[in-house]
Image (cartoon, rainbow, N blue to C red):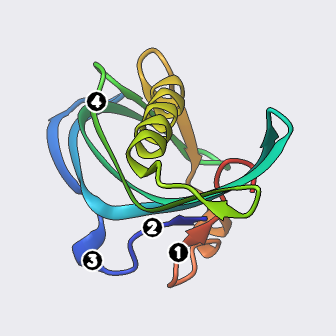
Amino acid sequence: KLKLPTTWEGVPELVLQNNDNDYSTWTVIWHPRQVSCELSITGKRMGMSFTCSATLTLGLTGEFEARFVGGEEPSVTMSFLKEPVLQVQTSGTQLSVASMPMPMQEAVDKEIRQHALKALQKSIFPPRTMTFSLTSSSFNDFAPNHSAHALGG
């Protein structure tokens, strides 16, 4: 479950660096703890069932280019100009194997952080682009308590 900021203090800092007719360049700073993701994984390894849960907090600092498209279906396409700095922290990690708690928090935390960083890098590092609709209906999808499911959940 992905939790996004619900107050103005929690939104990322955006600074306009350059504005051209076709595009603009921005710096974004999204401090850790402003975005969190609760994970819960259940599976089987070497014939033994396991469950793992953790909370990830994410931070991001980088420079991106935004291209705005008008018309009937306005949108913005964003791409980072170079690899942004990503911060991934874990907390509340719990691992149980065959219903027994396991004292492996550091190793599990490290593995979760590495997988989260790889997934984020694959999704947002250049040359990847992200396109967001700017229609009035897309803004109506944002409720005051922003919450979305992540990782196909």
Check if mark 2's residue and mark 1's residue have beta carbons within 8 Å.
yes
- The disc, 3 or 1, on the residue closer to the chain's N-terminal end is 3
**Residue bearing mark 2:** 4
Q: Residue at x 30, y 31 (%)?
A: 64
Between the C-alphas of marks 3 and 2, the distance is 11 Å
Q: Nearer the viewer, mark 3 or mark 4?
A: 4
Q: Which mark is residue 8?
A: 3
Judging depth in this view, the residue of 151 and 103 nearest the camera is 103
Between the C-alphas of marks 3 and 1, the distance is 12 Å
Between the C-alphas of marks 3 and 4, the distance is 23 Å
Residue 41 seen in render: no
Q: Left or right: 116 with respect to 153?
A: left
Q: Quadrant of the N terminus?
A: bottom right
Q: Residue at x 46, y 15 (%)?
A: 127
**Residue bearing mark 1:** 146
Disc 2 crowd, CA 10 A, few/some/many (<14, 14-19, 20+):
some
Q: Which mark is residue 33?
A: none
Residue 45 on image: x %, y %: 78, 36
- The disc, 4 or 2, on the residue closer to the chain's N-terminal end is 2
Dot 3 amino acid type: Trp
For residue 22, what is the image quadrant?
top left
Dot 1 amino acid type: His
